[in-house]
Amino acid sequence: MNKHLLIFIVFIHCSISFGQTQKDLNTDEMLRGYIYAKSGIEDSTAAGGFGVTRNTSKKINDSLNFSECGFFMKIDTCITTVFAEHVNGYRLFIANKSDTVVALVASDGRLNVIAEVYYQNKWQPIEYLLRSWCGNSYHKVYLKQDEYWVCIIPNYDGKLKVKLRYKLILNKGKYIYSNAIQTQINSGQLSKPKGYKSQWFIE
């Protein structure tokens, strides 16, 4: 093969392999919950099933510029990051600036957090939580004072312009909500739960 032709083919291959651009997530189905957190305190009462995640809590520092107080969630759209391969994402902070340790129910390391959108004059979920058949999956995770978790969430795209926020389900029917941001989704995300083997299931 001609040397110059070989060099050209290699150049084209590298351009295709490394020149792929990030895209927003355009889907027509609900995603399962994908917010995982590792506790700095072990749940000594749990039977097991803590799940494997490297998302450990970190100390809050001045660079984060949190103006919020208490226990809160915050979507940060200032910096775009990577949710999954070639998918744009934002950072979701779960932070504790209260004076007590916060205990949250989890299943195999996954927190009870979903995204919901304001559409047709009401808030509606576009993600769902997969319930485990095994009781050993359930446990608690703890977030100490002045610590936070940072999770990656997808930047959605679609035909409907909506407001989006994240909802963390606490025990006894209580919730906390993140700030709301403008985004776009597709109508199928409001009513079509994704199958068990989802390519977008991120741990």
Image (cartoon, rainbow, N blue to C red):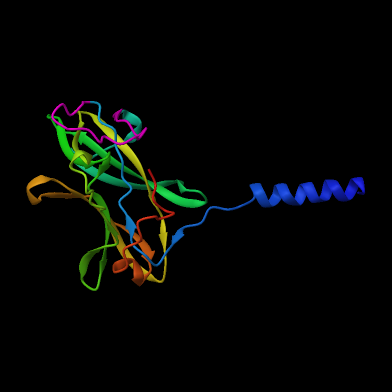
Picture quadrant of residue 156 = bottom left
In the rendered structure, the answer to whether residue 142 lies left or right of residue 181 reads left
Q: Is residue 197 found left or right of 118 in the rendered image?
A: right
x, y percentage for residue 82?
Answer: 47, 46
- Look at the image and tell me whether residue 86 can be seen: yes
Identify the main secondary structure in magenta: loop
Q: Is residue 183 left or right of residue 60?
A: right
- Which is more toward the observer, 4 or 58? 4
Q: Position of residue 27 (x, y in %)?
A: 42, 64
**Image quarter hosting the C terminus:** top left
Residue 178 visible to the viewer:
no
Q: Which residues are magenta?
A: 41-60
Residue with the most extreme front position: 134
Looking at the image, residue 162 lies above or below residue 38:
below
* Above/below status of 158 relative to 36: below
Residue farthest right in this picture: 2
Q: Residue at x 37, y 65 (%)?
A: 29
Rendered residue at 7%/48% (across/down): 172
157 falls in the magenta region = no
Total numbered labels: 0
Position of residue 160 measured from the top left corner of the image (x, y, whole percent)? 37, 71
Q: Where residue 161 appears, x then y in whole percent?
A: 36, 68
Image quadrant in which you'd find residue 158? bottom left
Please name the residue shown 87% across and 51% down the image. Answer: 5
Vertical arrangement, residue 166 with respect to residue 192, above or below: above
Q: Residue at x 82, y 50 (%)?
A: 8
Q: Which of 59 and 31 lies nearest the eye of the viewer?
A: 31
* Residue found farthest to the bottom: 120
Magenta span includes 59: yes
